[in-house]
Amino acid sequence: MTKPTLLIVDDDAEIRTQMKWAFAQDYNVFVAEDRHDALAVLDKERPAVITLDLGLPPDPRGVEEGLQTLSDILRADASAKVIIITGREEREHALTAIGQGAYDFFRKPIQVDELKVIVQRAFYVYQLEREHRTLQQRLSHESSGDMLGASQQMQSVFATIRQVAASDAPVLIMGESGTGKELVARAIHQQSPRSSGPFHVINCGAIPEHLLESELFGHEKGSFTGAHTQRKGRIELAQGGDAGT
């Protein structure tokens, strides 16, 4: 089983060596002493978790280089979990890093057993997030609107929905009662350029025949007995959107 990849970024060679040996049993460990080396490892190895000392050359006594390294790492891989390593007097800088997207921070002097817990948790969160993204991608291919399905037949339906949703042509959806005609109509609407417009559903079977025309197209005041006010039809109300019947 392949070990997870961990990157340690620190300008202190002794600390890099100490941490590499401490984590080598459980992780595939890479080290870097500055921003340039860190980004090179990131590009090649794609580590899931990174420990980052804010004090990096050319200004190891400051934090600007470390914060810039954090920014560059997250720009290159927003899913990476960056754990800031900081001195006790630099808590405010660590909180700044958290605000910029760092996963957590750990204060020096480094207690390896405690840091191992944080690193292990970071890998766990990274894995959960990756599984969630994979599931979302799979569902996006196995769903359309409120419908789910992985069978060849449902995939064919989803493909047809995507195809007709891009068109302005009227669509006739046929099927027995309970087969999901309204769900298909909603999915077409949601994926169409008219998705921000209204969507009206009409159960024609529940409307008396002599009222259906008025329900669909509306009527003017006094056009028939009982027409006391002007009423817009469902088709007019759906202007700019869609109507399902």
Image (cartoon, rainbow, N blue to C red):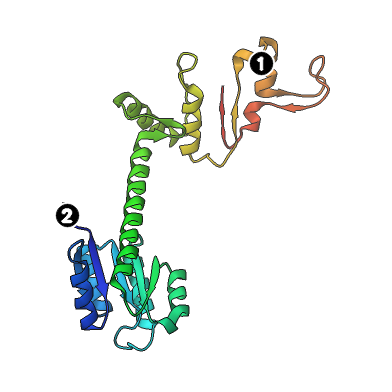
On the image, which quarter does residue 241 sit in? top right
Where residue 97 appears, as percent x and y from the top left, is 43, 73
**Residue 21 visible in the current orientation:** yes
Residue 187's disc is: none
Query: Position of 29 compared to 195: left or right?
Result: left
Sequence-earlier tag: 2 or 1:
2
Relative to residue 69, is residue 182 depicted above or below?
above
- Towards the viewer: 208 or 230: 208
Residue on which the image places disc 1: 212
Report crowding for label 1: few under 14, some 14 to 19, many 20 or more residues within 10 A (C-alpha). some
Residue type of the residue flagged with mark 2: Thr
- Towards the viewer: 20 or 114: 114
**Mark nearer the viewer, 2 or 1:** 2
- Towards the viewer: 78 or 85: 85
**Residue, x 56% and y 42% (percent of image)?**
196
Residue 2's disc is: 2
- Helix, strand or loop at label 2? It is loop
